[in-house]
Image (cartoon, rainbow, N blue to C red):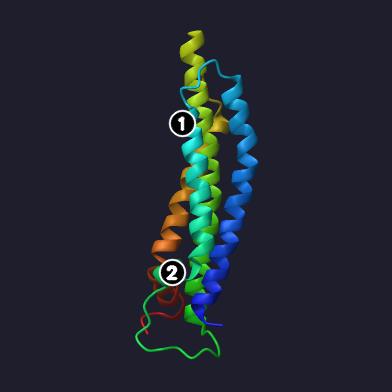
């Protein structure tokens, strides 16, 4: 298997993960919409769920295209026999980034839904809402997951070089 095949498998697994998380988010979105007096945010929930399903379909049907975009360009063609440690580390960092980004996106959807719903209830009932420290900490953790996921995906080659420089010096 080539390195693109390994990443394509990871992309498809990510598509399955996002699809399952989307299916799990549908009942909560329906409950938020049913409990509300107004359907002002119905289009937002429907568009987020539709975009997530479209993302799953794109990831499922075009994994090799995505894998080629994520992987660094090789200067010479690689043999199909083995993957050396450097490429394996880049693949691992990229897949870790995909995992962090998946977790962060699902948490982001949760917090956006909660923020919108809380804002609607506060305006409708004219009272102040104070976020609890654990909620604020969870929002910060979600932001951290998104940032780390993006850095690992987009900067896996630079991180790999930094690790090798730290481990072996300036060789």
* Extreme residue in the top direction: 126
80 versus 15 height, above or below: below
The crowding category of the residue bearing disc 1, from other C-alpha atoms within 10 Å (few below 14, some 14 to 19, many at least 20), is: few
The earlier-in-sequence mark between 2 and 1 is 1
Task: Tell me the residue at 48%/91% (across/down).
Answer: 79
- Mark 2 touching mark 1, by CB under 8 A? no
30 versus 108 height, above or below: above
Any mark on residue 43, and which? 1
At which x and y percent is residue 15?
A: 56, 57
Q: Is residue 89 visible?
A: yes
At which x and y percent is residue 112?
A: 49, 34
At which x and y percent is residue 25?
A: 61, 39
Any mark on residue 65, and which? 2
152 versus 112 height, above or below: below
Distance from Cα at disc 2 to Cα at disc 1: 31 Å
Looking at the image, which is closer to me, 163 or 3?
3
The crowding category of the residue bearing disc 2, from other C-alpha atoms within 10 Å (few below 14, some 14 to 19, many at least 20), is: few
Q: Quadrant of the C terminus?
A: bottom left
């Amino acid at each position: 298997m080539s390195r693109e095949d390994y990443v394509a498998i990871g992309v498809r697994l990510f598509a399955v993960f996002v699809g399952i998380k989307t299916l799990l988010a549908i009942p909560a979105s329906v409950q938020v919409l049913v409990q509300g007096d107004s359907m002002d945010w119905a289009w937002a929930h429907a568009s987020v769920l539709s975009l997530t399903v479209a993302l799953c379909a794109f990831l499922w049907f075009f994994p090799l295209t995505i894998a080629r975009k994520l992987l660094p360009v090789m200067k010479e063609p690689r043999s199909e026999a083995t993957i050396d440690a450097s490429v394996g580390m880049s693949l691992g960092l990229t897949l870790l980034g995909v995992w962090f980004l998946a977790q962060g996106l699902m948490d982001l959807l949760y917090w956006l839904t909660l923020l919108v719903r809380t804002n609607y209830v506060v305006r409708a009932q004219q009272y102040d809402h104070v976020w609890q420290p654990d909620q604020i900490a969870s929002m910060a953790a979600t932001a951290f997951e998104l940032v780390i996921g993006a850095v690992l995906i987009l900067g896996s080659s630079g991180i790999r070089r930094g690790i090798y420089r730290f481990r072996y010096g300036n060789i």
